[in-house]
Amino acid sequence: MKFLEDPMQTIGAGFALTAVLMVGYLGMAGVGAGEADWAGLLLRWVHFLAGITWIGLLYFFNLINAAFLKSLDGPTKNIVIPKLMPAALNWFRYGATVTVLAGILLYAKTYGMQGGAGATALMIGGLLGIIMMANVHAIIWPNQKKIIAAVTAAAQGTPAPAEMAQWGRTALLASRVNFMLSIPMLLFMAAGSHLK
């Protein structure tokens, strides 16, 4: 079980397990490999995986990390932020991008230009997701990137810039907007198959 000690190996094992289970399912269900909508299934799966990564980190940042970082003294922040935030924010912003792109492709594949039952609910959820992704790339990440650079420099003795508190507040408020928008976004994403 050495693979459980490395998250990337664990992800690889999860993909391998998925393939084995899918082959078993197709055999038990009597579904031929050519009968399945593989493109739709894979797009939905990627959309779910990336979305769980993105929104899971969004909830972590808002419910746990913001208060935790406020509780740390300056020297401890200089150690924690450069080690934690770059990797967490990489997963966060790439999760946002992949979620939205896979969602757009899935919506286009499923509904095209015709729409259909549930399409409007999904469109509302998708628009909220696009706004959230724009916040990630246009506001949250640029401000967090400046904070990470300033904290890294402060660990080497460079004084923190006066604007750093404002960068943090701007990133926090944009993240809180995304946190708020995620609640109706998730409802409308789920509503597409239930509000017909």
Image (spheres, rainbow, N blue to C red):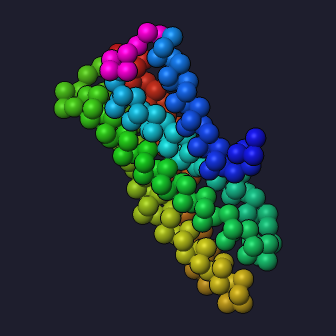
Q: Is residue 186 magenta?
A: no
- Range covered by the magenta-colored residues: 29-35
Judging depth in this view, the residue of 180 and 2 nearest the camera is 2
Q: Residue at x 48, y 54 (%)?
A: 94
Side of 114 where 9 appears, left or right? right
Q: Residue at x 79, y 77 (%)?
A: 75
Q: Residue at x 72, y 83 (%)?
A: 155
Q: Is residue 49 visible?
A: yes
Q: Position of residue 69 (x, y in %)?
A: 73, 63
Judging depth in this view, the residue of 6 and 102 nearest the camera is 6
Residue pushed farthest left?
A: 113
Toward which corner of the image does residue 146 lie, by quadrant? bottom right
Side of 130 where 177 appears, left or right? right
Q: Position of residue 66 (x, y in %)?
A: 68, 58
Residue pushed farthest bottom?
A: 158
Q: Number of labelled discs?
A: 0
Judging depth in this view, the residue of 106 and 130 nearest the camera is 106
